Image (tube, rainbow, N blue to C red):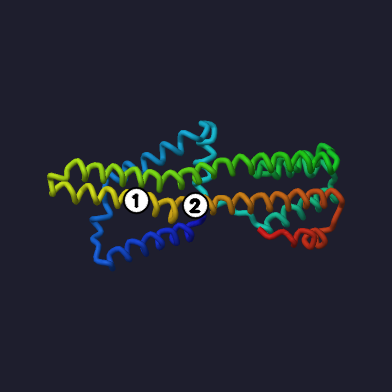
Amino acid sequence: MDRWSLVIVFFALAVVVTGHTLEGGALSLLWNPAAALIVFAGSFFAALAQIPKAYLKPLMGMLSWLFAPPVYSFDGLINKLVTCGNALRRDGILALERLANSENDPTFKKALTLLVDGYDDETMKATMELELKSLEERDLDIVSVLDNLAGYLPTLGIVGAVLGLMQVLSNIQQPEALAQGIATAFVATFYGVAAANLVVIPIANTLRQHIAIRRRYYDAMLLGLLSVKEGVNPIALRFRLQGVVL
């Protein structure tokens, strides 16, 4: 999710709030600290309890994609591969070792290192595919925490509603307390359903899209490096990879 997507999520929330005001509702009715505490804090800690401590840092890294999404450029990949091919034909395998040492992308660097070390195509392909699959599965496991959060939010909204109704029933002899209890009940449900469907689910699905794009990028990278090893010329290499849609 990039900044544009965040803007869209903001507009989705704004549409709901605007509809509320057009129906004559006051914005103050949507602010209820007790309901927010029950729904958001309760859901957050319930989801947090299901994620291993080692996943916290990768989760923060993935959430940073919301503001600075990773960029996977097909043209940039082609340029890297062409550079590798030209270096290999001109200066031999040691030239690829120099390129590997200066490469910032750890996955590309590892693939280049395997090529330099003389691994055969099948071993190189199996090694890289195992790493890519493991990374993809780990990141999808992390995204599943957001799926859990999306499930907890409406549930805690119901919990907030029940607590609000309990307050209403316990103070039924005190009419001045009824409004606050009813507000907590309905606002908690609103918080849970809106946050899950307008925020958390779109974020989770967008992170999955980034993971899928990354996998296609690195699959193309692996195919390209194997082609470089075969001595495929740059024009043919570009045509060979044009079927990859990032």
In this rendering, the label closer to the viewer, 2 or 1: 1
Which one is in front, 147 or 161? 161
Q: Which mark is residue 174?
A: none
- CA gap, disc 2 to disc 1? 20 Å
Q: Local crowd at mark 2 within 10 Å, few (<14), some, or many (≥20)?
A: many
Q: Residue furthest top?
A: 53
- Check disc 1 and give the amino acid type: Thr
Callout 2, which amino acid?
Answer: Ile
At which x and y percent is residue 5?
48, 59
Pick the residue in front: 183 or 117: 183
First-in-chain label (2 vs 1):
1
Element type where label 2 sits in the image: helix
Circle 1 residues within 10 Å: few <14, some 14–19, many ≥20: many
- The structure residue drawn at horizontal position 83% and vertical position 38%, both measured from the top left corner, is 119
- The residue shown at (74%, 62%) is 242
Q: On the image, which quarter does residue 108 sit in? A: top right
Evaluate if marks 2 and 1 touch, with contact meaning CB atoms under 8 Å apart. no
Name the residue carrying label 2: 203
**Residue 213's x, y, as percent?**
63, 53
Residue 94 location, x and y as percent? 81, 41
Label at residue 189: 1
Q: State the SS at label 1.
A: helix
Residue at point 74%, 61% (across, down): 243
**Quarter of the image that includes the C terminus:** bottom right
Return the x and y of residue 212 as percentages of the image width and height. 63, 52
Is residue 145 toward the left or the right of residue 190 in the image? right
Q: Image point 16% across, 46% down: which residue? A: 177
Considering every residue shown, the one lying at the far bottom of the view is: 22
